[in-house]
């Protein structure tokens, strides 16, 4: 396969796609709003994956305020108990949310947000690169896996029933994440608002140059696994006119990268393009120094995180019945704070599952306690739920996957948490 078959793009800086001379087909294809087999109205179920890169401190994100060892080991960065100034937002008497996640508290109590604690990889690596790779390929400890678990899902469904939309798997960002790389078609879109912009002749010259670079394999703004999917995506996005999108229900996304990514994902979902997988990265979680407690570095990141997710659910409204949001991070942080008022690379962490069909209002997973005798290698929160058990349950409950062995090769889920019906 040559370079043009592997990577097709549009520069994110506002190139003149209207000059390509293709007719919009967004309306004529009805963008998956009609089920071709039955003729009935149908919407795609969508799984939105948010990767907290850098290893989020699950112990300050979802605070085990009922575990006495938590306060003993974190004299400067622990979140105070519920009711205290800057205290955790109580969930069930044992766990509480970081106060910066206040926008998510109502979602937990209305049953649409579930939390899984002490979840992670069975591998003991504390390397960001290796742990992220293992989580995205779905094969912990195996570095030779060529594709990601989300791409294997796309390939499984594509083989079973033909799908003719290029938007089945979409990452918001400049390149495909490891989880979406593989043989199945997928898109990476850096900025929806760059599509459909008219530009003067110099920009058109850049477009010509960019297509020439394409034959040399240069990376640019829209990445696809084949030219067919990419050109089809360009045509459909022209008709979508992303610049005119207005969030619904008074939703206000925060101005940071995650807010922008979720705003674009919401637009693609509402456009009924048949998107089944959406993926976005959110970084900044590697808090070795000056992590802070109720306020500070981590609190700022969580404020943006909670506000963006809450705005997304508000924007989608009743469409959230067809959407599940799954958060993940490569590992957690040490139980004890370090000498720099931060935390170092740990083991287990906490993950969120939010949306339609989620049995929320609970913190799932077996809590191993923070007793030093129960910690992993004497220092970290132990993993009691393999991340593949959670991911497999979400795939089954949200997207109807039965052939889990094809998505997680060599692994049989050990337990069912009951997070999704």
Image: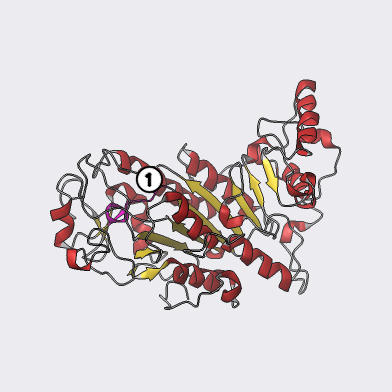
- SS state under label 1: loop
Q: Position of residue 161 (x, y in %)?
A: 74, 71
Residue occupying image coordinates x 77% and y 71% = 39
Q: Nearer the viewer, residue 67 or 140?
A: 140
Residue 285, compared with residue 154, is above or below; it is: above
Residue occupying image coordinates x 46% and y 50% = 129
Q: Position of residue 131 (x, y in %)?
A: 44, 56
408 horizontally vs 187: left or right: left
Residue 41, compared with residue 346, is above or below; it is: below
Magenta residue check for 61: yes
Res 44 seen here: no
Q: Nearer the viewer, residue 216 or 93?
A: 216
Q: Which residues are magenta?
A: 54-62
Q: Position of residue 92 (x, y in %)?
A: 25, 66
Q: Nearer the viewer, residue 248 or 98?
A: 98
Magenta residue check for 418: no
Residue occupied by mark 1: 285
Residue 115, compared with residue 211, is above or below; it is: below
In which quarter of the view is residue 359 placed? bottom left
Res 384 seen here: yes
Residue occupying image coordinates x 50% and y 78% = 412
Residue occupying image coordinates x 69% and y 60% = 184
Q: How many marks?
A: 1
């Amino acid at each position: 396969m040559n370079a043009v078959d592997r990577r097709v793009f549009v520069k994110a800086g506002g190139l003149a796609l209207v000059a390509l001379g293709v007719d919009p087909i967004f309306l004529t294809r009805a963008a998956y709003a009609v089920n071709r087999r039955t003729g009935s109205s149908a919407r795609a179920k969508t799984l939105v994956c948010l990767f907290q890169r850098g290893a989020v401190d699950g112990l300050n994100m979802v605070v085990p305020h009922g575990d006495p060892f938590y306060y003993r080991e974190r004299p400067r960065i622990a979140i105070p108990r519920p009711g205290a100034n800057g205290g955790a937002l109580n969930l069930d008497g044992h766990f509480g949310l970081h106060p910066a996640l206040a926008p998510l508290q109502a979602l937990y109590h209305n049953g649409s947000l579930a939390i899984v604690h002490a979840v992670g990889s069975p591998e003991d690596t504390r390397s960001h690169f290796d742990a992220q790779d293992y989580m995205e390929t779905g094969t912990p400890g195996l570095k030779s896996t060529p594709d990601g678990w989300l791409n294997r899902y796309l390939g499984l469904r594509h083989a079973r029933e033909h799908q003719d939309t290029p938007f089945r798997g979409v990452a918001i960002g400049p390149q495909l994440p490891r989880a979406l790389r593989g043989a199945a078609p997928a898109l990476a879109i850096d900025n929806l608002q760059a599509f459909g912009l008219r530009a003067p002749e110099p920009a058109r010259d850049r477009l010509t140059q960019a297509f020439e670079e394409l034959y040399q394999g240069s990376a640019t703004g829209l990445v696809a696994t084949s030219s067919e999917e990419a050109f089809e995506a360009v045509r459909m996005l022209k008709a979508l006119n992303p610049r005119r999108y207005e969030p619904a229900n008074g939703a206000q996304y925060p101005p940071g990268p995650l807010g922008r990514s979720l705003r674009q994902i919401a637009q693609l979902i509402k456009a009924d393009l048949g998107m089944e997988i959406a993926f976005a990265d959110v970084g900044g979680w590697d808090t070795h120094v000056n992590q802070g407690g109720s306020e500070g570095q981590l609190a700022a990141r969580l404020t943006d995180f909670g506000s963006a997710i809450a705005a997304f659910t508000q924007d989608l409204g009743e469409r959230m019945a067809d959407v599940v949001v799954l958060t993940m991070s490569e590992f957690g942080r040490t139980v004890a704070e370090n000498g720099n008022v931060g935390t170092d690379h740990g083991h287990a962490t906490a993950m969120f599952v939010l949306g339609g069909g989620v049995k929320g209002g609970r913190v799932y997973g077996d809590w191993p306690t923070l007793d030093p005798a129960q910690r992993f290698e004497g220092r970290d929160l132990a993993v009691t739920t393999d991340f593949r058990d959670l991911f497999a349950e979400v795939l089954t409950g949200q997207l109807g996957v039965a052939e889990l062995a094809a998505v997680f090769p060599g692994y049989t889920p050990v337990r069912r948490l009951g997070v999704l019906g």
